[in-house]
Image (cartoon, helix red, strand yellow):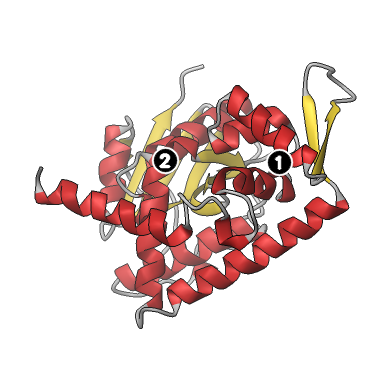
């Protein structure tokens, strides 16, 4: 085996050992990791049994056995969905809520202990985010959001910070067009956020003008998610949203300090054009006509 393969296997052993993946009593509470994860999913709002199965990647038979076991312990109840009798809903009992709360306390303490073992806390967190995003890339979703929502504001803060670092002149969003993203809300436009298991990892805005033309603004992908096709996916999604709004011509601008952005736009079929706005930061301009 190559050294790279050995390093991956070493990492796998370290993680499974640290989190107690093979323990018959995860965190000393009498249940293995599998039932604990199901209990955790329900506690965090996954009540539809099919949604729990998809979220955890479990087959139906295994999930049914785990649910029956937790139900026998008095930790949850299983009910038919009142709208669709073919679907089932799982809800925690008061005993289940107490067990969920204790797991949350212990897991949080375990996480804090891991972070305290290294002096470079942020580097450790960044490495964890990178691994988690790569391993969970099949579960990345693109969701419509209000640009004033916490997830959107998190993405935009990172985006503005990166522009400030990479532009020779720095970056002040108040000098750009539509700093408050008011035109990135329906019916004029939209704002999209890419999510990886609850963590915002990218965004893009569609700034509408009330007609058949609009601008793509604020495309950003977190460093931990770059190379996974998230930028192209966001662009495809925002183009689809534009079609839904009856928009036929899209424009965007960027700065030559962001060569990877221009490379992406060329790859996705955008055409360079002359300057079309008075924004002080961009020096490259593109447009794309959308097919119906």
Crowding at dot 1, Cα within 10 Å, few <14 / some 14-19 / many 20+, comes out as some
Badge 2 marks a residue whose secondary structure is: helix
Location of mark 1 (residue): 46
Residue 11 image-quadrant placement: bottom left
Pick the front one: 8 or 185 = 8
Mark 2 or mark 1, which is nearer to you?
Answer: 1
Q: Residue at x 32, y 44 (%)?
A: 274
Residue 164 in the image, given as x and y percentages of width and height: 38, 72
Pick the front one: 198 or 84 = 84
Which of the two discs, 2 and 1, labels the residue nearer the N terminus? 1
Look at the picture and state if 291 lies above or below 147. above
Residue 281 makes an appearance in the image: no
Residue 193 in the image, given as x and y percentages of width and height: 55, 47
Q: Find the residue positioned furthest to the bottom.
A: 119
Kindly identify which numbered label has been placed on residue 137. Answer: 2
Q: Residue at x 80, y 42 (%)?
A: 76
Pick the front one: 222 or 129 = 129
Q: Residue at x 57, y 43 (%)?
A: 34
Crowding at dot 2, Cα within 10 Å, few <14 / some 14-19 / many 20+, comes out as some
Residue 91 in the image, given as x and y percentages of width and height: 81, 41
Disc 2 to disc 1, how far (Cα)?
Answer: 20 Å
Residue 182 image-quadrant placement: bottom right
Q: Residue at x 33, y 59 (%)?
A: 14
Q: Quadrant of the N terminus?
A: top left
């Amino acid at each position: 085996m190559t050294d790279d393969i050995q390093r991956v296997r070493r990492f796998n052993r370290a993680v499974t050992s640290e989190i107690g993946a093979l323990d018959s009593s995860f965190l000393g509470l009498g249940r293995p990791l599998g039932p604990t994860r199901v209990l955790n999913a329900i506690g965090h709002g996954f009540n539809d049994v099919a949604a729990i199965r998809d979220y955890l990647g479990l087959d139906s038979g295994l999930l049914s056995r785990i649910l029956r076991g937790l139900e026998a312990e008095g930790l949850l109840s299983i009910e038919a969905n009142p709208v669709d009798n073919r679907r089932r809903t799982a809800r925690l009992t008061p005993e289940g809520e107490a067990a969920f709360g204790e797991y949350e306390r212990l897991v949080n303490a375990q996480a804090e202990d891991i972070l305290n073992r290294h002096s470079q806390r942020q580097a450790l967190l960044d490495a964890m985010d990178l691994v988690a995003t790569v391993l969970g890339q099949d579960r990345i979703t693109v969701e419509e959001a209000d640009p004033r929502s916490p997830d959107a504001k998190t993405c935009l803060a990172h985006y503005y910070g990166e522009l400030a670092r990479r532009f020779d002149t720095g970056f002040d969003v108040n000098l750009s067009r539509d700093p408050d993203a008011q035109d990135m809300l329906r019916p004029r436009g939209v704002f999209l956020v890419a999510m990886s298991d609850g963590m915002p990892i990218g965004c893009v805005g569609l700034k509408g003008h009330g007609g058949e033309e609009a601008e793509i603004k604020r495309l950003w992908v977190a460093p931990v998610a770059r190379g996974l096709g998230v930028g192209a996916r966001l662009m495809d999604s925002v183009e689809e949203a534009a079609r839904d709004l009856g928009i036929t011509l899209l424009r965007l601008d960027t700065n030559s300090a962001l060569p990877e952005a221009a490379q992406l736009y060329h790859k996705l079929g955008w055409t360079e054009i002359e300057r079309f706005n008075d924004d002080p930061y961009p020096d490259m301009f593109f447009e794309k006509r959308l097919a119906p």
